[in-house]
């Protein structure tokens, strides 16, 4: 079985940033999944679960209410490894084109007075939120993005190099 693209990325070399994870076509329209990575996999501590949950609510709400982007947003949600989020948008844009949007929605977290959608009728784990830690992670990511805005590595996945056999088959180890 072929590995999916996100498992073919060299996680020992990936840095925080905004990456194109995959592009799918639904009818005539492209749908693009972006990896918005806040932490270096396997090198930094993961994002605290309650803060991750709060960031999910805050940023999903911001994206889906943004007049310029709300019709393009399909999904914003956490990665299982707790190092970042997936953003799925209609269309296809280069990751660098999302820089200002991502910077803005993470900056907006700092001004939040509450996490939206945290009542029992709105959320499956309504008590598992931490607004102050969400603000801390958001500030950390904003500072990182600002400091690395011109660094191409925050927009390009480091691909895992796989040996190719004589007949063109790619080798995947276990």
Image (cartoon, rainbow, N blue to C red):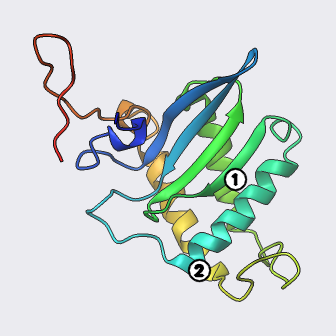
Most extreme residue toward the left is 166
**Image location (x, y in percent) of residue 33:** 59, 37
Relative height, residue 119 to residue 75 (above, below): below
Q: Which mark is residue 46?
A: none
Q: Which residue is mark 2?
A: 50
Closer to the camera in the image, 125 or 168:
168
Relative height, residue 65 to residue 90 (above, below): below
* Mark closer to the observer (1, 2): 2
Closer to the camera in the image, 161 or 51:
161
Q: Is residue 46 left or right of residue 167?
A: right
For the residues labelled 1 and 2, say whether their Cβ atoms are less than 8 Å apart.
no
**Image location (x, y in percent) of residue 86:** 58, 49
Q: Residue at x 61, y 26 (%)?
A: 24
Q: Secondary structure at mark 2?
A: helix
Q: Secondary structure at mark 1?
A: helix
**Image location (x, y in percent) of residue 61:** 80, 59
Q: How many marks?
A: 2
Which callout, 1 or 2, points at the residue further toward the start of the chain? 2
- Place residue 41 in its image quadrant: bottom left
Mark 1 Cα shell of 10 Å, populated few (<14), some (14-19), many (≥20):
many
State the quadrant of the N terminus. Answer: top left
Q: Which residue is mark 1?
A: 105
Q: Residue at x 73, y 66 (%)?
A: 57
Mark 2 Cα shell of 10 Å, populated few (<14), some (14-19), many (≥20):
some
Most extreme residue toward the top is 167
Q: Is residue 131 left or right of residue 95?
A: right
Q: Residue at x 83, y 73 (%)?
A: 117
**Image location (x, y in percent) of residue 146:** 49, 47
Q: Is residue 18 left or right of residue 152?
A: right
Relative height, residue 118 to residue 97 (above, below): below
Q: Residue at x 62, y 81 (%)?
A: 132
């Amino acid at each position: 079985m072929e590995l999916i693209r996100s498992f073919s990325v060299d996680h020992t070399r990936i840095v925080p940033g905004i990456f194109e994870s995959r592009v799918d076509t639904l009818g005539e329209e492209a749908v693009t999944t972006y990896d918005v990575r806040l932490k270096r996999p396997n090198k930094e501590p993961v994002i605290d679960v309650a803060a991750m949950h709060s960031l999910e609510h805050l940023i999903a709400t911001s994206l889906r209410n943004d007049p310029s982007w709300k019709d393009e947003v399909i999904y914003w949600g956490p990665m299982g490894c707790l190092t970042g989020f997936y953003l799925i948008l209609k269309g296809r844009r280069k990751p660098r084109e999302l820089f200002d949007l991502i910077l803005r929605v993470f900056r907006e977290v700092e001004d939040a007075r509450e996490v939206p959608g945290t009542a029992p009728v709105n959320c499956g784990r309504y008590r598992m939120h931490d607004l102050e830690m969400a603000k801390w992670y958001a500030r950390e990511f904003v500072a990182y993005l600002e400091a690395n805005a011109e660094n191409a590595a925050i927009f390009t996945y480091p691909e895992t190099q796989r040996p190719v056999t004589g007949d063109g088959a790619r080798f995947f180890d276990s």
